Amino acid sequence: MHPSDILFQGMHQPVSLPACDHYAGSEKLMRKSLALQQQLGPLFDITFDCEDGAAAGNEGAHAALVGELIAGDANWFNRIGARVHDPDSEHFESDVAAICTRAAQRLAYIAIPKVESAAQLSAAIDTVHHHASAAGRTDLPVHVLIETHRALHEVRDIAALPEVECLSFGIMDFVSAHFGGIPATAMKSPGQFSHPLVIRAKLEIAAACHAYGIVASHNVCTEIRDLSVVGHDAAQAARQLGYGRMWSIHPDQVRPILSAFAPDGSEIDEAVAILYAAQRNDWGPIQHEGKLHDRASYRYYWTVLQRARRLGQTLPPAAVTLV
C-alpha cells in the first residue's frame, strides 16, 4: 500500500494545491502568465479573471477569450482556473457557460467571488455543475472568496460543501465592508497581521479549511516593488496563520511566495528520516533522536514532503517510496 493509504486510512486526504495562485485579467497579462508557467512549470496556478478583468460591456467576449486560452495549446499543465462574476451578477451564469463550453475538460477550477451564504453558494455550484456536465465534466472543483460578514459567519458550512477545495480571503472588500470600522492600514502589512478583526477573519477561514481538509488561500500583497514584503507576508500566512496558498497579482511576486511556502532542507531531511524509519517498522511507533513518533506525526511529516514535491524541491533518494 502507498504510505498515504496507510497514514490516512479511514480519513479524507487533504487537498493539495500549488502554493501560489497568480491572478491575471487582461489578455496581455493572461498570455504573459502562461509564458511564466511554461518557464517555471506547474509550481503555481493561474486564475484568469472575468470579474475585474473584463471591461464594462465586454463581459461576454472576455469570458469567451478566457475559455479559449484555457483550452488552447499554451495551457501545458491544466493548472488554470477562472474567476467568474459573483452569483448575484447578471454575468455569472453566462461566464460559467462560456468558459465551460470551451474548456471544461481542461479547467482547473471555477473561483466564485462575494459569496454571501452556503445556500447561495450551493445554488451557484448547481449552475456550475449544470454547464460543466453538459460539456462532459462532472468533477469540476470550486474555489470561494470569503469577502463579506455573512460569508465569514457561515464559513464552516461553506467549507463543508464537497465541491469546494479552496477558500480565499478577500481582504479589500472585507475591510471596506466595515465602513471605516477597520482602518485602511489593515489592508496591507504590517496592519493586516495585527488588527484583531482582520486576524479573526483570517483565522476563522484557516480553521474552517483545516476542519474539512481543503486549502486556505491568503489575500493579495499589494506591494509589487519591494519583494521582501511579499515574502514576509507569505511567510506570516504560512507559519503563523495556517495558510497553504497565497495570491499573486504581479509575475515578480510568484517566486517569493513559492520560496516562503517551501519547507527548508533540514525539515525535509527530518521528514525523510522519520518516515523512512516508520516505513521499515511497518508504520508502527518509532523513536527518532530520543523522541517518540507515531502515525499522527507521520501524517505531518508526509505533508512536508508533499509540499516540497509540489514546489519542485529536490528530495533525497530515500523519499522515492514515501511520496
Image: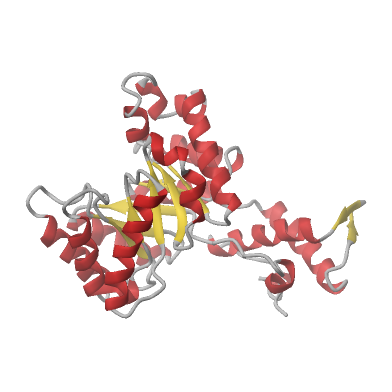
In the rendered image, which quarter is residue 108 located in? Answer: bottom left
Q: In the picture, which quadrant includes the N terminus? A: bottom right
> At which x and y percent is residue 295?
79, 61
Nearest the camera: 216 or 147? 147
Numbered-mark total:
0
Q: Is residue 222 left or right of residue 283?
A: left
Nearest the camera: 276 or 174? 174
- Answer above or below: position of 251 versus 197: below
Q: Residue at x 49, y 49 (%)?
A: 157
> At which x and y percent is residue 41?
43, 66
**From where the camera sits, is residue 226 visible?**
no
- Answer above or below: position of 298 versus 200: below
In the rendered image, which quarter is residue 123 located in? Answer: bottom left
Q: Residue at x 38, y 29 (%)?
A: 187
> At which x and y percent is residue 59?
13, 55
Q: How is the image coloured?
A: secondary structure
Q: Residue at x 69, y 73 (%)?
A: 5
Q: Is residue 159 left or right of residue 129?
A: right
Q: Residue furthest front?
A: 119
- Answer above or below: position of 293 versus 179: below
Q: Is residue 84 left or right of residue 46?
A: left
**From where the camera sits, is residue 152 visible?**
yes
Nearest the camera: 280 or 100? 100
In the rendered image, which quarter is residue 63 located in? Answer: bottom left
> At which x and y percent is residue 16?
54, 62
Nearest the camera: 38 or 112? 112
- Answer above or below: position of 299 versus 238: below
Q: Residue at x 51, y 24 (%)?
A: 196
Q: Residue furthest left?
A: 57
Q: In the picture, which quadrant includes the C terminus? A: bottom right
